[in-house]
Amino acid sequence: MLEGGVPKTPIDIEFPEGEKDNRKYIVIVGSLMSGLGKGIVSSSVGKILQSKGLKVVPIKFDGYLNVDCGTMNPFRHGEVFVLEDGTECDMDLGTYERYLNLDLNGYNNITGGKILRYVIEKERRGGYLGVDVQIVPHLTNEIKKWVKKVGKDFGADVVLVEIGGTVGDLENSYFIEAIRQFAIEHPGQVMFMQLTYVPTLSTVGEQKTKPTQHATRLLQGMGIQPDVVICRELEKLTPDAKKKISLFCNVLLEHVIDDPDCDTIYELPEIFEKQGLAEIIIKKLSLKTDGEGLAKWNGMVGGIRKPKSEITVGITGKYTALKDSYVSIKEALVHAGAALGAKVKLKWIETSEIETDKSKLKQLEDCDGIIVPGGYGARGTEGKIACIKWARENKLPFLGLCFGMQLAVVEFARNACGLKDANSTEINPETPHPVIDILPDQTGALGGTQRLGTYPAKLAKGTRTYAAYGKENITERHRHRWELNNKYRERLEKGGLVISGTSPDGNIVEFTEWKGSFGIGTQAHPEFKSRLEKPAPLFLAFLKAILEKK
């Protein structure tokens, strides 16, 4: 059980007498700099092993002292991803789910704040029998138990452990120490991969391996010898650079792996497979495999690489300066586009600029459809509302996600129902028409309780929303606090707004849509459940509407 992302029951794990933990563990660490794509590398390694018939589960450690990502600014950290159980976590968990087609939970994301809080609460309960609690062995032991628990809970053959940050960071040093101990305690069951960066200096045109050599020595100084060095670079490693890394980093030549730029991140499993990475892992960890390989996966990737058509979708948001703020939306469009043979070009539209200059609405003229994503706070909202009005009046396909749905309701109330100055109480607590508000049963000491994680919904037959899902009862993930105010529900419906989905008891409006053109709003975040192997139904319907209109 988790509460606020923190386990409230012991994570101690016991194996019956005579039974051994035979699982294998692959640890991925990064060096030199952040942003190299450890999450994508970890997911690609997992996809390769999954294609060989192995059951894989990932864990991500983040060293920051936040318990979870719920309070983090998207400008600093990128998107806050939400899991089935409501855990707000690092965006790499989304990458894992998209590649591996798994539903993960709060135990798959360990943060410094989460593990330290657990240790402190356990000490307060007398869980350490009165000893002086220390980083070693108490904190490191809890980390090791946590890693083993996730493997056992998922019945995994292989556990992938990604360590956030870079080697040498103080905030992840105790986690690296725990994994070093873990490898000693489980001989033959643990493999280390180091992701590094090999720059090419434009002045001399030569790939420089010295930074990687120094980074590897730092890792070796912490008691860990990488079995594989994966090299992020602009161009494929030269034979000379590869030899230097092999020689000075103490790894076999064939264990130096290229991680070059590619057209789509979903190509990386095939790139690794062609370099023999799967066989290196299988041999090192003595794994037994019987899978069919990457043929099916590569076929879906082909839909991304060789599209039959091209469309432009406008993302109208206020975090457009950092594209990672909307990574799940970007990937959901890739998945739906691949399934429909369409390349989706994104046009980023900063709505805070439209607020001060309505002429910038002309940017929408180049779009085949627009998405208004989630968000918090007043900045940029009037710009979003202006975009929604333009889309509705010009019959431009529209998809509103969470806050996007709420603002679509505000726009409709103002311009189709005559409710002047209608708004959300999040934006204007004094609005005369609070069409979006916190429901009475949600109010509390902190002003409201956020809905997080998976919730069921019942769809109305005969609606576009029902057609998109093809069934009446569905589930989607949520991350929001405000809802459509039921006091205005009848007025909105009389004005022509279609309530196309509600909570099973009918009390909460989950989906709305327009008559006459494709314009669906959802209180949920369907992008969180989209995978290449299973695109999100609403994104498929949105792109189909665009293609039909074109």
Image (cartoon, rainbow, N blue to C red):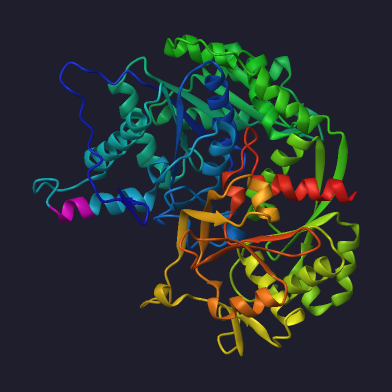
Residue at 83% x, 29% y is 306
Q: Residue 32, image x and y in percent?
A: 57, 38
Left or right of residue 42: residue 61: left
What is the tally of numbered marks visible in this picture?
Answer: 0
Q: From what the image shows, is residue 186 above or below residue 424?
A: above
Q: Left or right: where does residue 263 sit relative to residue 26?
A: right
Foreground pick, 281 / 359: 359
User: Is 207 covered by the magenta stretch?
Assistant: no
Vertically, is 37 above or below 27? Answer: below
Q: Position of residue 286 (x, y in %)?
A: 43, 10
At a point 56% along the width and 36% down the height, the residue shown is 38
Residue 81 at x, y percent in the picture = 53, 51
Q: In the displayed orientation, state which residue is furthest to the front.
A: 462
**Picture quadrant of residue 518:** bottom right
Q: Is residue 90 above or below residue 499?
A: above
> Looking at the magenta stretch, what is its main secondary structure?
helix
What's the residue at 46%, 24% (across, down)? 192
Q: Is residue 1 left or right of residue 206?
A: left
Q: Residue furthest left?
A: 130
55 or 186: which is nearer to us? 55
**Residue 320 visible in the shown view:** no
56 or 136: nearer the viewer: 56
Tell me residue 288's x, y (percent): 45, 9
Closer to the camera in the image, 477 or 262: 477
Give, as a single range, the part of the protein colored magenta.
121-125
Q: Inspect this view and state whether residue 250 appears.
A: yes
Q: Is residue 261 left or right of residue 457?
A: right
